[in-house]
Structures are given as structure tokens and as C-alpha cells.
Image (cartoon, helix red, strand yellow):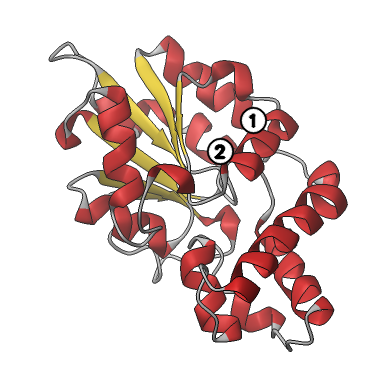
Amino acid sequence: MSERTKVALLDIDGTLIDSNDQHAQAWVDVGREFGIDIDYGHVRRLIGMGGDKVLPEVAGLEEDSPTGEKIKERRGEIFRETYLPTLKPFPQARELLQRLRDDGWMLVVATSASKDDMDGLLKQAGIKDLIEEKTSSSDAEESKPDPDIVQAALKTAGARPEQALMLGDTPYDVTASGRAGVRCVALRCGGWGDADLGEAVAVYDDPADLLSRYDESPYAAERA
């Protein structure tokens, strides 16, 4: 990879598409099916982590246990069948990605979502054609806030940490990228406030806000 290559690592849920509430509701729904009382407010604060982190927290089950595997599979089905078709991208998400591409950034997805969820989300958001590389939960041993997914995305892109900027919406994105040595730009549209996103190098309301202030953003500052 060229010394001058710039890599934009992208979270999807809550960053480019408005889906965090629906992910939380899918957890509540699957818990009801399995006789487990999952509190919406509790699980909503965990969205942004992968199922390997969420499941033990809300149900006391490990992801690789027989029941854990069934819950994980069913949660994905509920999300994709019931909620995914209703989701909408945040305003100007596509335009922001196009601007990044036009400005020389390589677009690489770095998400804790499963591969099936990721593919569906990219398609529903209308941005799949803009993405150059993708990494999901299947590419990492541990999900965010562990750095595995960010490191896997860097490896896929053939880039060093200093060549990248992460775009995310949760403290888990900020922490995961920081542990991988990557700076993070955060968006508030996923439901988190500035106090939660404090270690990000910059914070914006949503993709439209970032796009409107692009020329003063960390992305523009990386121009050669």
C-alpha cells in the first residue's frame, strides 16, 4: 500500500444507518421467545458490541453454548426479517462516503455485526457499491471494544494505524480503535453523548453534519 493511502474504517449500525434501537428490540424479542427477560434499556446501552459480549451480559450465557448459539441465530433472523426492511440510512450517509472516496479515502467496513447482518445493512443503506473492503464479527476473535475487528480491517486494507481514521457512534468504537492505535471520529446519531465519546478526535451530530463541516474535519486535514 502506498505511503499516502488513507483508509476510512467504517462502523455501520448507528453510524451510517439508524438501527441501534431495532437491534436492541431484537434482543428483547429473542429473549421473550427463550423465556429470558431482557431489559430494553440495559441491552440498548450494549449495542455496538458483538453478540459474544452482549449475550453473557443480558442472558448469562456464552455465545458458544448450545442455547447461546440458538439465541444468536434466532436474534439474527428476527432482526433481518422484522426490522432490517424498515431501516433507513442517516441523511447524506451516501454523500459522505462519496465525498471520502472522491478525496482519496479507501472505504473499509469494520463492524461487530455478523456477516449476514452486515451485508443486509449495507444493501438497506444503499451504500454497498461504495465499500471497497469489509470485515465483520467472523473476521475477529473478540468484538468491540476489543481491537480485533479494527486490526482485521487494517490488515485487509494493507494499512498501518496512522494511515486510518475510524468513523463510529459508540464508546466501543472509540475504545476499539484507540486500542488498535487508530484515531476515531464519532457521531452522536447512535444515541451516545459527548461524555461517552470523549476520546474521539472529533464529534459530529450525524453524517450530514460531518459532511457540512468536512473541510474542517480530521478527514480534510489528511490531504496530501
Depth order, front residue of 125/197: 125
Q: Position of residue 176 (x, y in %)?
A: 31, 56
Instruction: Write the residue at 56% across / 74% down.
Output: 55
Label 1 to label 2: alpha-carbon separation = 6 Å
Depth order, front residue of 173/60: 60
Residue 129 sits in quarter: top right
Q: Position of residue 102 (x, y in %)?
A: 44, 10
Horizontal placement of 127 versus 60: left or right? right
Instruction: Estimate how packed mark 2 is, as few (under 14), some (14 to 19) or many (20 or more) residues with alpha carbons within 10 Å.
Output: many
Amino acid under label 1? Gln
Horizontal placement of 37 versus 101: left or right? right
Instruction: Write the residue at 69% across / 58% down.
Output: 73
Q: Position of residue 11 (x, y in %)?
A: 48, 43
Residue 166 sits in quarter: top left
- Check the picture and name the quadrant holding the C terminus: top left
Q: Which residue is mark 2?
A: 207
Amino acid under label 2? Pro
Tags 1 and 2 touching, CB below 8 Å:
yes
Q: Which residue is mark 1?
A: 92
Q: Residue furthest left?
A: 3
Horizontal placement of 163 versus 193: left or right? left
> Does 90 appear above or below 134?
below
